[in-house]
Image (tube, rainbow, N blue to C red):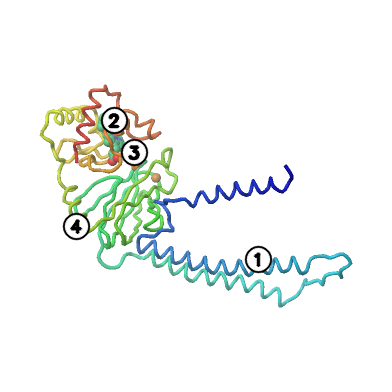
Amino acid sequence: MPRGPRWIVVLLAMATFALGACGGPFPQSALDPASDFAWKLQDLFEGIFFWAVVVFVLVEGALIVAILRFRERPGGPEPKATHGNTLLEISWTLAPAIVLVLIAIPTIKTIWDVDRPPRGESLVIEAIGHQWWWEFRYPDLGVVTANELHIPVGKQIDIRLTSADVIHSFWFPRLGGKRDVLPGHENQLWFTADSAGLYLGQCAEFCGLSHALMKMELVAESPEEFEAWVEHQRSDAVVADSAAFAEGSQAFLQGGCIACHAVRGTIAQGVIGPDLTHIGSRRRIAAGILDNTPENMRHWIANSQAVKPGSLMVVPELDDETLDRIVTYLQGLK
Ligand code: HEC
Ligand SMILES: [Cu+2]
């Protein structure tokens, strides 16, 4: 093949891969804002991007003109030296300095704006990072849950971030900037979601072997739906009146699970793992990595170390019957 066409093929292939990234959907795109915080970042980004395009066109345009007009031609005169031209030196020092100041002003303004404490009334949520899952507490509402946040649309949320072990980072890209989650220090993050929906988030600071599997979900819903969710979550475990459920609850209590898990309203009061009082009502399990189906739950309980390498959930080997009973029980904890 002649040289030309081969390059065209390479370019086309590269363009195809690059464009492939534009396919969507983008559940974790920071460029699709859904809260006041995220909009502040978007506005800053768009403003700076516009000016960057102007600078780019001017600079690259000047470069192309210089290349075309002033290139060396056979028999042409020697170019004039510009070394020591004070006017040129001052202008190409000043121009970038002005550009940097113009970028710095809105940037610093935005940083101050998202860093200050929240104004006005807000719903306080405590988010505690654990290797490798998220604990969520609503101190004023008496709700404790894990990995699945619920918030009312249009209400300011004030999230207090701490860690039970190492440094994590809390990030829902569509709702705002990431923020460090530190042991022994409380960080704060606030925003108001502007539209209902399901938002995906994850830990954004390397925190050990299964860092990539430390995800979370946020359900933004109408105040009425949120109210109903709270009402349900704050209640004790809903006990189904069936023999299978009773057997399962026995298996759960005897299987060592209560060393780490709590099921409110029973003697299970462990605090090392997620609160399982309403585990049956969660969309996903094990920090957002598996759909909450009986098969997946069974798989997780029997193979937590394979599903999540290094997981702090360590259980003795359970026989099939015990596993089935436990799964029936947990799935029943709606
Ligand atoms: C040594 C402590 C420990 C024991 C014992 C333990 N777990 Fe866990 N469990 C954890 C931890 C930690 C997690 C969070 C794992 C993660 O997502 O990284 C977890 C997560 C879970 C989850 C998913 C919860 C959620 O919110 O998604 C289920 C279900 C579960 N465990 C069931 C069980 C059952 C059933 C047993 C008993 C057979 C058991 N666990 C025993 C520590 C434990
Ligand atoms: Cu983490």
The residue sitting at 14% across, 30% down in the picture is 246
Image spot of residue 1 (x, y percent): 72, 42
Per the image, the residue denoted by label 3 is: 290
The numbered disc on residue 127 is none
The residue sitting at 34% across, 32% down in the picture is 304
Tell me if I can see residue 76 in this picture: yes
Tell me if I can see residue 273 in this picture: no
The residue sitting at 25% across, 65% down in the picture is 121
Per the image, the residue denoted by label 1 is: 60
Three-letter residue code for mark 1: Glu
The numbered disc on residue 224 is 4
In the image, taking residue 204 as reference, residue 303 lies left or right, namely left
Q: Quadrant of residue 177?
A: bottom left
Against 187, residue 296 (above or below) is: above
298 and 262: which one is in front?
298
Three-letter residue code for mark 3: Leu
